[in-house]
């Protein structure tokens, strides 16, 4: 029983092994998340930088494909050639190779994707600046020395092309693209033939023909992998139908170095235009800062700058017709005053209606909504510029007529938004941003509509215009994205810098300047006030000092005068006292002397009586002197009074004689 169980277990295990192994084998063949890629070196298609960074048309295609297939990759054969990669595919060393053209022989051994992954044309190039070979003038092709790549299918295409157009050439073969390009630049060959999947440097493309598709391929035994690849490519086409053009423009944009290759008819047209001395008259709408506008009578903006570069490359003489307003621009355009309108809408129906022809689009921009910064609701009232072609069509297709507020210009639309008459307006993107930057109070904001775009073209209505159109088309295609970006950046900056910057604008845009300026002004006035107060106080102090000085000088003078007066009074008093003491001594001497004589002559009554009489006179004189001294005090105090009365002069003299007689006798 146990033996039977063991046998059954072995049989079950064997069955499981048999069932699992094919599934695992199939999974290894069809469901592996890693795909091995033949990654041969090819400029612009498969590129590995010195740092190991991969890029190129083929590399980016694989990355886009992996988004829908869910794979990762292993890369092999970068040091080998394209033919080596196909050999690696045959031997099973890689799973896929890209950029493979279908041939009956290859279809016998490989599976190709249902849809091509790109196109490769035959191109005929010359060194940039070689005007001896003229596009379309096959007589100038005859006898030319042409460089070709060895074993390249494009060689047979060019042989057929030469036979069809009746010119002969001499072929020189090169092993690789680098050798071919170097030979063209050093003059070993006059022209080169190759596929369009070749990086061009300093070359002009004169002819491009026999475009053929190329594919991704795998081995015949990998049908499962090819089904997954086809599904992924279909998904890529569904989500982005233009991915092939995008990859080609990214990695194989032709660098003409600003030069334009002209055919015989185009050259003849320019020569005739130059010999006639005619200057082309150009027109644009001035209401589109910074796209195109006038400043001090000079044309400015992105579009005039682009045309200026184009005209320099073509040696075209031109002048702008000044239009003062949008209405005048349309009037001039309708009157046919201009040979060329440089800001024509890229609309063939409109061009046909105005009986003119237009070039391919040469500049693209977006629309933008301009509103107050605080606005966040639905637009119920929209300001719209009258006589605006593409912009008007865009607005009227989205807003009802009763919601629109017609305005004469873009500035009027902006004013309607600022005044509150309109919720918003729709302008071209750079125009909208310019108004945002012009608003010194920072009230506006601009929102660019990324899903909308508008293209400018050049229109012309002059005789022989088909040559001019083809010339302008080639000129438009001669611009690289980098050149256009540089022109846009420069002109937008210039439009900003050319605005009249007011003090109010500076303060609104830089409020910190206002704070600092106000602080400086207040500090200035505070310092000025403090200085004024200080000067006022100093002036008052100086006045007080001056007054005090004057008062002091007056007091000094008064004191000096008083001192002098006091000195004089003292001297007078001293003199008076000296004189008075002398005068008093005289009657006193008389009194003393007559008193002594009287004493001696008491017995002589008459004599004594005479002496006593004289003593009385002397005493009266002494009394008058003393009264005089008292009168001096009354005089000084201002109390003196004058008593006028008659006197006997003889008695006065007799009295004086009696008083001084004793002194006279004493001295005699």
Image (tube, helix red, strand yellow):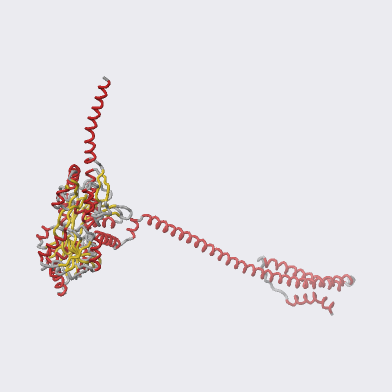
Tell which of 400 and 260 is nearer to you: 260
Position of residue 553 measured from the top left corner of the image (x, y, whole percent): 60, 68
Q: Is residue 330 above or below residue 77?
A: below
Tell which of 140 and 322 is nearer to you: 140
Position of residue 490 measured from the top left corner of the image (x, y, whole percent): 28, 62
Total labels drawn: 0
Position of residue 326 measured from the top left corner of the image (x, y, whole percent): 18, 61
Q: Is residue 347 above or below residue 277?
A: above
Q: Residue furthest front?
A: 3
| Residue 459 seen in this snapshot | yes
Locate the N terminus by quadrant: top left
Tell which of 625 and 268 is nearer to you: 268
| Residue 335 seen in this snapshot | no
Tell which of 261 and 127 is nearer to you: 127
Residue 187, image quadrant: bottom left
* Residue sitting at x 23%, y 27%: 11
- Residue 388 horizontal side relative to residue 620, left or right: left
Locate the C terminus by quadrant: bottom right
Q: Residue furthest top?
A: 1
Position of residue 408 measured from the top left corner of the image (x, y, whole percent): 18, 58
């Amino acid at each position: 029983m146990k033996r039977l169980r063991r046998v059954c277990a072995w049989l079950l295990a064997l069955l499981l092994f048999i069932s699992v192994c094919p599934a695992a084998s199939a999974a290894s063949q069809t469901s592996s998340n890693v795909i091995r890629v033949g990654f041969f070196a090819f400029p612009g298609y498969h590129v590995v930088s010195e740092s190991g960074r991969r890029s190129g048309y083929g590399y980016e295609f694989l990355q886009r494909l992996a988004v829908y297939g869910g794979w990762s990759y292993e890369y092999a054969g970068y040091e080998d050639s394209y033919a080596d990669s196909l050999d690696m595919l045959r031997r099973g060393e890689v799973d896929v190779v890209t950029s493979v053209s279908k041939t009956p022989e290859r279809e016998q051994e490989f599976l190709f994707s249902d849809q091509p992954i790109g196109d490769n044309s035959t191109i005929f190039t010359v060194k940039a600046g070689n005007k001896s070979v003229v596009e379309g003038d096959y007589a100038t092709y005859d006898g030319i020395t042409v460089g070709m790549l060895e074993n390249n299918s494009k060689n047979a295409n060019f042989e057929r092309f030469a036979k069809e157009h009746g010119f002969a050439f001499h072929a020189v073969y090169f092993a690789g693209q680098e050798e071919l390009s170097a030979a063209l630049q050093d003059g070993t060959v006059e022209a080169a033939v190759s596929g369009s999947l070749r990086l061009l440097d300093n070359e002009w493309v004169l002819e491009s023909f026999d475009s053929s598709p190329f594919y991704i391929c795998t081995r015949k035994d990998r049908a499962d992998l090819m089904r997954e690849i086809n599904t992924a490519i279909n998904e890529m086409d569904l989500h982005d139908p233009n991915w092939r053009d995008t990859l080609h423009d990214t990695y194989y944009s032709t660098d003409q170095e600003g030069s334009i290759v002209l055919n015989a008819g185009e050259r003849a047209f320019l020569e005739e235009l130059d010999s006639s001395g005619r200057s082309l008259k150009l027109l644009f709408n001035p209401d589109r800062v910074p796209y195109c506008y006038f400043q001090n009578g000079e044309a400015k903006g992105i579009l005039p700058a682009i045309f200026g570069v184009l005209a320099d490359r073509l040696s075209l003489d031109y002048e702008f017709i000044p239009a003062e307003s949008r209405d005048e621009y349309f009037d001039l355009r309708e009157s046919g005053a201009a040979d060329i309108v440089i800001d024509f809408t890229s609309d063939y129906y409109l061009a046909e209606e105005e009986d003119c022809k237009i070039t391919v689009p040469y500049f693209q921009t977006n629309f933008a909504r301009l509103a107050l910064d605080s606005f966040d609701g639905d637009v119920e009232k929209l300001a719209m510029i009258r006589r605006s072609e593409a912009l008007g069509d865009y607005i009227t297709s989205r807003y009802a007529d009763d919601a629109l507020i017609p305005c004469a210009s873009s500035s009027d639309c902006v004013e309607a938004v600022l005044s509150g008459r309109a919720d918003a307006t729709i302008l071209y993107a750079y125009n909208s941003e310019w108004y945002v930057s012009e608003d010194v109070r920072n009230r506006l904001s601009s929102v660019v509509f990324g899903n909308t775009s508008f293209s400018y073209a050049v229109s012309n209505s002059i005789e022989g215009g088909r040559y001019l159109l083809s010339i302008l088309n080639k000129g438009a295609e001669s611009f690289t994205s980098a050149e256009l970006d540089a022109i846009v950046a420069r002109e937008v900056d210039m439009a900003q810098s050319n605005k009249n910057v007011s003090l109010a604008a500076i303060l609104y845009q830089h409020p910190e300047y206002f704070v600092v300026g106000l602080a400086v002004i207040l500090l200035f006035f505070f310092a000025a006030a403090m200085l004024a107060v200080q000067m006022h106080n100093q002036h008052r102090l100086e006045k007080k000092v001056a007054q005090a000085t004057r008062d002091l000088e007056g007091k000094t003078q008064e004191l000096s005068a008083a001192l002098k007066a006091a000195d004089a009074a003292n001297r007078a008093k001293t003199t008076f006292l000296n004189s008075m003491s002398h005068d008093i001594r005289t009657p006193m001497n008389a009194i003393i002397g007559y008193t002594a004589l009287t004493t001696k002559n008491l017995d002589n009554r008459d004599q004594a009586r005479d002496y006593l009489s004289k003593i009385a006179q002397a005493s009266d004189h002494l009394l008058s002197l003393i009264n005089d001294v008292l009168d001096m005090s009354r005089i000084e105090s201002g109390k003196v009074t004058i008593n006028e009365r008659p006197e006997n002069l003889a008695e006065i003299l007799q009295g004086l004689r009696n008083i001084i007689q004793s002194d006279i006798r004493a001295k005699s």
